[in-house]
Amino acid sequence: MNNGRGFGVHVFFVCVFLVATTCTCLGVGNITVVCSVQERLALLRFKQSVRDEFKILASWVGNDCCQWERIQCDGVSGNVVGLLLRGGYFASEGYLVGKEVDSSLAELMHLKYLDLSDNDFGGSRIPEFIASLKHLSYLNLSYVRFQGIIPHHIGNLSNLKVIDLSSNSELIVNDMSWTFGLSLLEHLDLSSLNLFGARNLDMVLYMIPSLKKLSLSHCRLSNADFRNPSRIVTNIEHLDLGFNSFKGPLPGFLKNMTSLTFLDLSDFDVNLAWNFANLLNMIPSLSELHLSSCGLDNTFLSSTHLNFSTLSNIQHLDLSVNSIEGTFPSLFTNMSSLRVLDLSGNSLNSWVPVMPNLLELDLSVNEFKQIEHVGIWRHCQLKQLNAASNSFDKEMIDSPKNKSECSRYALEILDLSGSLNGTIPEPLGRMVNLRFLGMADGELTGSIPESLGRLRFLEVLHLSSNNGLIGPIPDSIGRLRFLEVLDISYNKLTGPIPTFIGQKLSKLDLSFNRLNGSIPESFGNLAALTYLYLQSNRLTGSIPLLIGKLYNLDLSDNRLNGSIPESLGRLVSLQDISLNSNLLTGPIPVSLGQLVNLLYLDVSNNSLEGVVSEAHFAKLLNLKGLFTSFNARLTFNISREWMPPFQLETLDLRSCTIANEFPRWLRNQRKLCWVFLSNTNLSGPLPTWLQTLPIIQILDLSHNKLSGPLTNLPLHRNVDTFDPNLLGLLFLVNNLFNESIPKSLCTRIDLGFLDLSKNRLTGKIPKCLENLKELKTMIFSSNKLSGVIPSFTGLNNSSLGQLKFNDNNLIGELPRELGNCGSLYVLDLGDNNLSGIIPKWIGEHLTNLMVLRLHKNNFTGTIPKSLCKASSLHILDVAYNNLTGSIPDCLGELNAMLNSSLGTGSANPLNPDENVIQVMKGVVLQYTTTWPMVFNMDLSSNKLVGQIPVELTALSRLIGLNLSNNLLSGGIPDSIGNMAALNSLDFSRNKLSGLIPSSMAALNFLSHLNLSHNKLWGRIPSGNQLQTLNDPSIYDGNKDLCGSPLPKNCSYHQDPTTTLKKKYEADDDDSKEVWFYMDITSGFATGFLGIIGVLLFKKQWRHKIFMFTEETMDKIYVVVMVRVNKMKRGRDAL
């Protein structure tokens, strides 16, 4: 059933009923009547049978039920004749919830009007007792989730005029004969019921002569359900058969319906052109026709198929969501009676002609590109125009030519949402009759024109989500006295909030702008204000005095200061208070505990202080969500015996202080779904009563001093509150829990995030955790777990994204089954005692890996080349193992480390404790939310050999490279300067030789460098960032390096290559001199030993040599003496 039309009929019957009962009351003068005790007690029993979270039945107190809301009594007898309990899932008044309609209502024997629609009776059946309410003339059980077969005894209610069972999708009708006895029935609505195969369906058309309105939309009907009765059907005026399964020829019975004025055949498969034309000829009485989603195209609307005389009565035509495209069909200009035309959801894109008698035109969701084609300024007589979602490529203007086309505009509703760009034209202010103006969800820019303030009858103004509107809100907007709804959210408006004087303003949404200044005190005069949204601005000052019937108050994410006013506790209608993320101080007012309708209270992220006690919650009967997190000086001190009057669904006390013990007042909370108690000073073991609670699907107890085993965690599933579509979360990070991980955790098959890190857990990791098929994160870091990593065969092809078992005592090899977890993007098994080789399957199957950390284990063998296939790697850390072999050249092809177009990924926002540990700049760093932006390769402290692959220098996004403490040789690649993002570089303790490349001076972000303990020589390069790295220890252990920052100068400031050439030439001369002396010594030794050796073995030679020597000495002596004597004689002669 069309909800708008159906609701209108219901309103009519309600009004008639109320007038009748009022007239009856007036007729008895001043006589006071009260309801009977029996009926009052029956109503109270019904009240007890339902859950009334919205306090719909709050007035049902006292002895006179005729004075209760939603009850109507006969003015003479005092009997209850009307029970008006219409709810609404989206209405502010809420709805009732019950397992079934209590039979106590059977005692309301005089009931004429029963409306239980839009409530939730949990899939129960239509109660049998309704058949006993013989006086019923109006019965509305729509939207209540009934199921089963409609009981036939409803047909005994002979006074029924209206029956509405629509929108109970699980109700089944197997036979329509139960309706035949309803001789006074005028309106029957079975829309959205299952009528497939129901018997006697076509008989309804002529077996109920009083029937005027029949609604059977969405009932799975087909042509076979109607056998073309030949008799004339004169009574039915309104027939809704939309959205069924009709195909082919039109049902023949339509030609016999002589009084039919309304027909809905939407979603009828009209596959022949003559069907449409034939329909118009068949039922000349039609004034309203709906053919939405029928596959109609332009040929169906051509004049060759239509007799214009048959169109003379059509006043309302719905051709939405068809295939009408291009040029606007000309036939509509010939339909002089047409008042309402709906062409939404087609593909029209041309000029729309003026149709003088048309009052309502819907062109939304078409393909118009120019707003001039829609003709806003030409349709003077239109009262409603909807051109939303057309994406005009030109801005809306008002040319001088168009100004003269209409002296006055009749438009009352104009919706251009999702279509506009450019500025808002000033001439819109000439449409003085506008009641509704929608220009949201577009690309509007510039300021809001003052001329909008001339729309003195305006009730609704939507300008939200343009994100381009700037400047202040015009003061003239605040002077619109009839304004009821103003939504300018999600723009870039600045300046102060203007004063609003309209006493009808019920919803004001200025959120997500850049408004500043204080909240006007005049808001306290807006008596009708129901919803006030000012969040995410730059408002300052204190919260003013507010009045009215506020349901929702959102002032979050501003710069408001001062205390929370006590006066908020007097706004008894408040259901939602959001004051979070401001600069509020002082205590939470005790007066807030008086707000009996309050559902959600959020004061988190402020500077509140003081003690919160049970007095703050005294009358919060309906509280579902409490948020006080990040108020460090706020203390909860609630007595052990206190039992809350509410049933919470969400509790967030993070970074507050909970006095004494684990909050005992939670023991009766059976609907908890989200609980955040991290960093709240909790200590000791988990209480035993905690395990009696239903599963808390989101539970965070991190950063406390909780101890003992995990056996008391709540594991019981409550089918009424458990949400199978919600991924569970269990965070117990940084506590003192000990003993083993309980196998009972394996029953939490809803878990998506499990973090037990930084505790004292021991024992083995349970293999049954493979049962958690929905698990996305499993973190057991920094415990004392031992044994091998389970095979987790059950996690094959799972969605597991993070697996972190680092910093434990795990042993053994990596299980092959981990290769089946293709969604893994973080694998951290560092700081354990794992052994074996690094498996090839890591790179071949875990292609989504962003982090691979095997730091400080006992892995052996080589680095597998298959790791090069893990193209998403941001962090590769295999340091401190026993790896051998060379560094694979193909590591220089890791795409994520060299291609900035691949993005960086993002951390998990659900886990603030998520981190990745890396050694960077020589120290251990813990990266939290920023880890996806870290690109690091650490292969240090292994036994790697060979040269540094020049291919590694292509990794331009790498910010850390550590190859230290290996056996690498050769030189540093000359292209090292290409690694422009390097922040930390460590090649220390290897066997590298040669010059330090001058390109290293181009590393502008380098802040940590270690080249110590190698065999490098020559001058240290200078310039740019290297000049700031002036610690000599960077180059320790390289005795042939010289230049700043080392004390050793390079001689004569010569080029390092020249100096080294001379050094090697000098070394060459020294070696030649050595060889010269070695030659002399060897020659002397050879000659000397040759002569002495012969003399030793030849006696005759010895005699001869001695004789020769003696004779030679004698001769020498004689010669010397003769010369001496001559010299003496010469001196004497003188």
Image (spheres, helix red, strand yellow):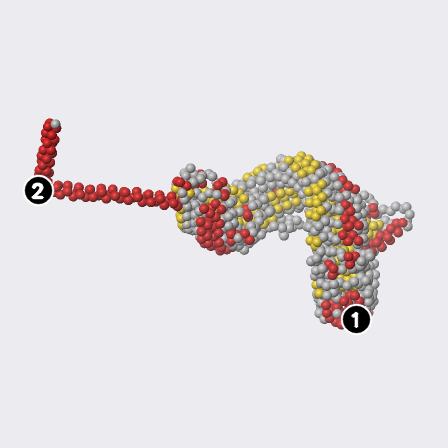
Q: Residue at x 47, y 39 (%)?
A: 1030
Q: Residues within 10 Å of mark 2 (few under 14, many from 20)?
A: few
Q: Is residue 166 above or below residue 715?
A: below
Mark 2–mark 1 Cα distance, whole angstroms, equals: 160 Å
**Which x, y percent locates residue 917?**
51, 44
* Mark 2 or 1, closer to the camera: 2
Is residue 376 visible in the rendered image? The answer is yes
Name the image quarter holding residue 194: bottom right
Q: Residue at x 90, y 49 (%)?
A: 28
**Which x, y percent locates residue 624?**
69, 45
Is residue 220 visible in the rendered image? The answer is no
Q: Residue at x 60, y 43 (%)?
A: 700
Q: Amino acid at mark 2?
A: Gln
Q: Is residue 156 above or below residue 464?
A: below
Q: Nearer the viewer, residue 653 or 110?
A: 653
Name the quarter where the C terminus is drawn: top left
Q: Is residue 373 above or below residue 747?
A: below
Label 1 secondary element? loop
Relative side of 46 to 896, left or right: right
Q: Which residue corresponds to mark 2?
A: 1100
**Which x, y percent locates residue 77?**
87, 50
Q: Nearer the viewer, residue 756 or 765?
A: 756
Q: Is residue 850 above or below residue 299?
A: above
Name the quarter where the N terminus is drawn: bottom right
Relative side of 1006 to 638, left or right: left
Of the numbered discs 2 and 1, the one sitting upstream in the chain is 1
Q: Which residue corresponds to mark 1?
A: 307
Q: Amino acid at mark 1?
A: Asn
Q: Residue at x 43, y 38 (%)?
A: 1046
Relative side of 199 to 710, left or right: right
Label 2 secondary element? helix
Q: Nearer the viewer, residue 350 or 26?
A: 350
